[in-house]
Amino acid sequence: MNNTFKTTLLLSLLTILLVAMGGAVGGQGGMIVAFLMAAVMNFGSYWFSDKIVLRMYNAQEITREIHPSFYGMIERLSARAGLPMPKVYIIPDDSPNAFATGRNPGHAAVAATEGILRILTPDELEGVMAHELAHVKNRDILISSIAATFAGAISMIGTMLQWGAMFGAGRGDDDERGGIGGMVGSLAMAIIAPIAAMLIQMAVSRSREYLADASGAEICGRPLALAGALRKLHNASQAIPMLAARPATAHMFIVNPLTGGGFASLFSTHPPMEERIARLESLAVRTY
């Protein structure tokens, strides 16, 4: 419930930021136009994102005949979670990672790299795939799409403000003081608002990771196995980075496939690994 409340609050902040920027551009009309443009683009991403991302990583669909142990594991976990059987894919990449995609539980897919199948024990792999199925069950793809729609609209309005500020700078002397003040204010909002939207979008993603960890532990029944898997994946993914990974899809993976620390970690779509592991260990003590 706590994470659900946080997500609702963060999406509300995106809405407020969007409305404020729409008013800065020129009232309700400008806000509606920019929002509709972003919604159209994200609508396409929502309906076709699963096919796009699976093709991006050259994921190969498997059946029970091709990989009976892994396919059977997903089948058992799906039954425990009360979910329809998703499509199952393997990514030909040595970097250990996994993700889920699809617009709803009836149109879902889970994918794991060859690397993760090699380094994890069966219990650890089960914990990871339970985490991914938890994303499907919690409809995180829908939440991410909503956040992306708002963030996209805010970025578009920011661009409109930049152009408006530049063209507004040439007004007459009577409006010079107000024009300069308005130009500076518009440029400030054009720069700050998209950054704020990005930070809010990342916060939504981070809160959903915590929820998926807890839900995944409940599905597989072994929070310590998932904690152990996260520890292994964090270390191994740094040693063997995923060269094909892109920032636009980094939030989908169970661990961040992009390398980088320090200042870059402030803009990570994933919560700190130490905190995720600590929460799972605490859950194991309280529940099991």
Image (cartoon, helix red, strand yellow):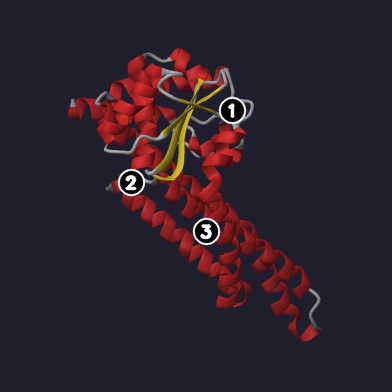
Using the image, tell me which numbered label, if any, was put on residue 43: none
Numbered tag placed on residue 150 in the rendering: 3
**Could one spot residue 75 in this view of the protein?**
yes
Question: Could you say which is closer to the camera, residue 179 or residue 204?
Answer: 204
> Is 120 displayed left or right of 150 in the figure?
left
The residue that appears at 47% across and 48% down in the rendered structure is 144
Q: In the current view of this chain or complex, which residue is farthest to the bottom?
A: 174
Q: Quadrant of residue 229?
A: top left
| Mark 2 crowdedness (10 Å alpha carbons): few <14, some 14-19, many ≥20 | some
Label 3, secondary structure: give it.
helix
Q: Amino acid at mark 1?
A: Thr
On screen, residue 17 above or below 75: below
**Where is mark 1, residue-wise?**
259
Residue at 18% over, 25% down: 288
Q: Of the residues under marks 1 and 2, which one precedes in the sequence?
A: 2
Tell me the number on the disc at residue 3.
2
Q: Residues within 10 Å of mark 3 (few under 14, many from 20)?
A: many
Would residue 134 appear left or right of 63 to someone viewing this image? left
Counting from the top left corner in percent of width and height, residue 34 is at 60, 66
* Residue 141 coordinates in the image, percent (x, y): 44, 46
Task: Check contact, mark 1 vs mark 3: CB within 8 A.
Answer: no
Residue sitting at x 32%, y 20%: 225
What's the residue type where badge 2 is placed? Asn
Mark 3 and mark 2 lie on one chain; the one further toward the N terminus is 2
